[in-house]
Structures are given as C-alpha cells and as structure tokens.
Amino acid sequence: MRSSNNNTKFSLVVLMVVLCGSSGLASAAEITVMGYRSGGFQENYQKAVIDPFNASHPEVHVTFYGVQNAAVSLGLLRAQRANPQADAVIYDLSVAKIAKDEGLIDEIDMAKVPNAERLGSIGRELGGYALPLTYDTFTLVFNQQVFADGAPDSWKALWDPQHRGRVVVPAQGGGDIQAIALTLLTNHMLGADSDETIEPAIEALIELAPAVQTWEPKPEQYTLVANGSADISVGWNARSQYFIDQSEGLLGTVAPQEGTLTQVNVISPIAGSANPDATQTFIDYALSAEAQQRFSELMYYAPTNIDAVLDPSVEERVPFLDDTQHDKLLPVDWMKIAAARDELLNPWRRQIIPASR
Amino acid sequence: MKILTANSSSLGQLKNTTKPRLWLWALVLLVPLLVINLVSFVGPITHLVQLSFLQSRAGVISGTYSLENYANFFSDGYYWGLIGNSLMMSFTVTLITLGCSYPIALFLYRMSASSWRNVLFVLTISPLLVSSVVRTYGWMVLLGDQGVLNSALLGAGLLDHPLRLVNNRIGVAIGLVETLVPYMVLSLMAGFGRLDLSLEEAAASLGANRIKRFFRIILPLTVPGIALGCLLCFVLAISSFITPKLLGGGRVFLLATEIYDQAVIQLEWSMAATLSIIVLLIFALTLFLYSQFARRFG
C-alpha cells in the first residue's frame, strides 16, 4: 500500500513539474531567426546575440536557423509564404529587395525598434522593411607565404602574370554578388563610371580569365589560398578575418589602395509571423550597440549601430572603420544593382568565364 | 439437371458479383500508389509547368502568365549552347563509359560461377556504396594541381608544370565516367542473356577468327544490353549535377548546373522551371528513340 501511495505521489509531482514547465514555456513567445550558417556566422551569432538575448528576455525565446546563403533564405520565404516557419531573416540587402517586392516581409514599427534611429546611413534603402545589421567590405585575399615580401596593395595584383593559374575568382553559378563587386571595383580602378558603362571592366576581366584556376572554389577561396592551392583571390573581410584566425596566419587580407565597397546584411520581420511583437523586440536587441559590438568583435563585421565601440585590436582588422578606407569606399546603390543584375552578370556567363576555357 | 441449372445460374451470379468486387479491391489497392504519385510526381510537375509560364523581373516573380521564358530560351544562343554542351558531354561520357565497361561486363559474364566471380562483381559495383560527393572530392584530391597524380609526375621530372585535370571538362568527364561505370556494367550484364558460347564455337569451327566472331556474333547479341546501358548512362549524365559542379570549376555550363544556378544564384525560379521542362522533354525524346531502337533491334 505504502509503495502504491509513494508511486501516486511521485506521479503527481512529475505531472506538476511537467505542467509548470510547459506553462512556463507556453508563456514565452517562441521565435525563429533565419540567417547564414557557414563561416562561423551561426556559431558566433548564437554566442554574441541569441544567448544573451534569451538570458535577458525570459518572455521571448529565440532559435537560430542556419541556411547556406541569402538565396536559400529567399527560397524558404517563398515556399513558406502561406505558413512561415521563421519570424525574422538576416540576409543580403539586394535579396531583401526581392523579398519586399514579393510581399514576403513586413515593415517594422519604428516605435517598437528605437535602436533603428542609431543606425548608420548605408543600407537603409528599404526603410522599415530591412534594417542594416552588419557592414562588410570586399578585399584581396592572399597567401602570406607567397606574399612574404609584403601584402599586395592593388586590385592589379590579380592580373600579375606571376600568379597565372593560381588566381581564384569566386563567381558561383556564372556570377554572384562577389562577381558584381569585382566588376564595379575593376571599372572604378580603370577610371570608368559604372552608371555609364562596365565595358572596361569586362575587357579587363576577360584578360584575367585565362589566369583563373577556378570560378567556383570548393571549399571556399579562403581555404584554397590558406592551404597553398592558390596564391590570391578576392572575398569578404569578415570571412577572411575568420579564416586568418583559423589558419593561424597563413591567410592574409587587405583592402587595396584604390578603395573597396560595402556589402550590407539586413534584418527583416517575415510577413505572417505569429509573433510580430516578440520579433521586433529581438530586432531591436540585435541592432543595439552591445549586441553589435559583441558580434563584431567575434566576426569582424563593422557594426551598423553608430554607438557601438570596438576594441582597437578588432577595429584595425575592419577596413570599414579605417578612416582612409572609409573615405575611399565606392558608393554602391544596391537597389539599382538588383534591378540591373542580369546586365551585370550576363557578361560573366557569356564572355568572361568562357574566355578561361 | 435442374440442380445443375440452378448451380450454373448461381455460379453466374457469383461471377457477376465477384467481378465488381475484384475491381473495387484493385482500385482500393491502387489508391496508395495513386496518392503517392499525385503528391510526389504529378503535383510538383504541375507546379513546375505553372512556374515556367510565370513572368519574372530581376528575380521578382509576378503573377502574370506568359510565354516569355520559353521565347527567351529559344531565341538566346546561350541556352542552345547549353543544350549542345550537355548533349555533347553526355554522349562522350556514355561512349567512354561503354568502352570501359563492356570488357569488364563480358569478362564477368563469361566467368564460371565461382566465389572469384562474386568478389569481382561486388568490387565492380562497390563504388555505388560510397556517396558520389565523397568520390568526387576524392577525384579533386587525386587530380588537382597539387594532387597525387601531378605530384608524382612533377616529382619524377616528367612535367614542368601540373596538368590541368580538374576545374574543366576533362575533370567532369573523368568524374562522370567513374560514377557511371557500375550502372553500365549492371545494364550490360542484364542484357547479355542471349549470348551463347555454342554459337561462338560454331563460328570458330567455320573459320571465323576472334575479331570476326566479336563483330558478327557477340556484338549483335549484346545490342540490347548496350542500348539499355547507354540509355541509363545518358539520362544520368545529362541530369548529373554534383560532379560537374565540383569538378567543373565553374567553367562547365550544363543544363543541370544551369537550373541550380538560375534557381539558387540568379534567383530566377521561372527560368529554372523552364529549363527543367526542357530537360524533361529531352528525357522524353531519349526514351522515345530508345523504344524505337528496341523495337527494331531488340
């Protein structure tokens, strides 16, 4: 009898614990944030932003869902239009424009996201639909052993015959955002205005093509350059810095003297989210100075919140924050680029890459 | 007689009532298959066809239907080039695979049933046990500029600079042939049923040498296996995506890789759907040609 009573008591206690636990969970709004998976992004975003947010906001619980790239995010948004499984998305500004035009994202209520007022001016073209979350810059990526005498200081280093067959130009799928960036910077280097013509860049890239080892580096160009399979490439500063740490200094990266350009990652609330208020609470936190500072110090992105102050050792590894480089930033209208994507990428598929066969 | 008549009529009634029941049961048994087909094949294909007719501007899909994507496809030499590249690559790979697989299949078929035959057969098809991604990465390691082959040749002083064996068409062809050999061997062996050793012996007794015996006896009798293997390998080659993507270095543009690029990189889902429909039509044409060939020579 005693045993039976004990069992009943134990069952009741377990039931109460389960009920209390589930009611506790039920009171917290569950939201999912979709963003990049690779290059340490997911791991570091979890550490710098999601975990501290969950600890300081018991009323909301955020889960990060990592995807391969911004295009995959757009694909999921399209596929889940009727029943979205995520509440906010972190992706590239030019992809955000497509999401906005297709009605896949919502406009943020600025009253609920006060940190939006503290953001920089770059990457705000979509207003409340997509707020800038990180700034990154396009850089040269090189093998430190090959360039033992000094880092390359010009985009022209790609054309150096000494590196013929050992140059990697990432142009995935016949041209992606990196191909667009290289087109614009080559044109700028040659003194041409991309609003008028990109012909000088196309001609120069056709000339470069035979020296290119691969247009679709597998794994990424950072690994190929770090392990000595290639001498030089182009890429993003944040990822380069991540791989510099991973390769223990075998990789190097530099923003060349001719200047560079900025890529903007933005955050948007997804249309049809079941928890719009909790989503905006998170977005506000993600844009706060402390969250931006923590993430930038792990990933070397430039923070978009103007109040975020980085450690000097980190700051010197972020060209966007270097006054000289900042002054030389090539202004890019990513909205215009999104509309003219075909015109910019068709030459890659039809002229530049075929010139390397 | 009366009893017999009565029995016959009840048998007739029984037959009449059993037939509809059998049909009903057959339909009930077919329902799961029909549902699976509708959900996993007819539904997606219908959606694909619908998507291929939707207009798209800079990646943004509008709700307007038009023939624009098909018009762009047929009026643009770039896409014709893709078809040409894909057909050429698939034909070449199929022929090389056939050349590599035929002697292996014939040897295995003629071996007397023994444990060695089983061992060799398992070895031949064992690559199928490993993911094609893993095997393709293996080729990258073997054939790369700093790979095993180039290092050996450079080390032996036979080369001044590494041979370019990956990040181009050669790499894709090597990877695809290696992937397809087991399929070809299996198809050839399945089609070797008409091969009879006594026919060869008869030809030999009449003075036919080895070459004559091969071209007059063996080859004609193995045509069904060759046709089946070529069909399978051609279809697999033209739809292959991983090997060209990993070993092509972004230089080898084929229909399958273009569909991926249009959907995932260029974000042009409508054009990707149009290309998918074109590939389906190529498959249909290939199957039609195969059926005609099989009817004539099978």
Image (cartoon, coloured by chain):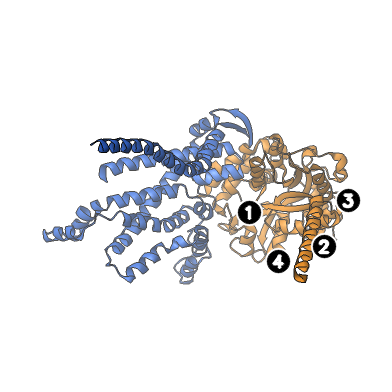
Chain colours: A orange, B blue
Residue A249: image tag: 4
Asked if residue A183 can be seen in this view, the reply is no
Residue at 47% over, 44% down? B33
Amino acid bearing label 4: Gly
| Nearer the observer, A291 or B77 | A291
Q: Earlier in the sequence, mark 3 or mark 2?
A: 3
Estimate the x, y position of residue A243 in percent, counting from the top left: 69, 61
User: On what subunit does the disc labeled 4 rest?
Assistant: A
Residue at 85% over, 60% down? A311
Count of numbered badges drawn on the protein: 4
For label 1, the residue is A158
For label 2, the residue is A313
Identify the element where label 1 is drawn: helix
Amino acid bearing label 2: Ser
For label 3, the residue is A307
| Nearer the observer, A241 or A100 | A100
Identify the element where label 2 is drawn: helix
Estimate the x, y position of residue A222 in percent, counting from the top left: 65, 59
The answer to whether dots 4 and 3 both sit on one chain is yes
Q: Residues within 10 Å of mark 1 (few under 14, many from 20)?
A: many
The answer to whether dots 3 and 2 both sit on one chain is yes
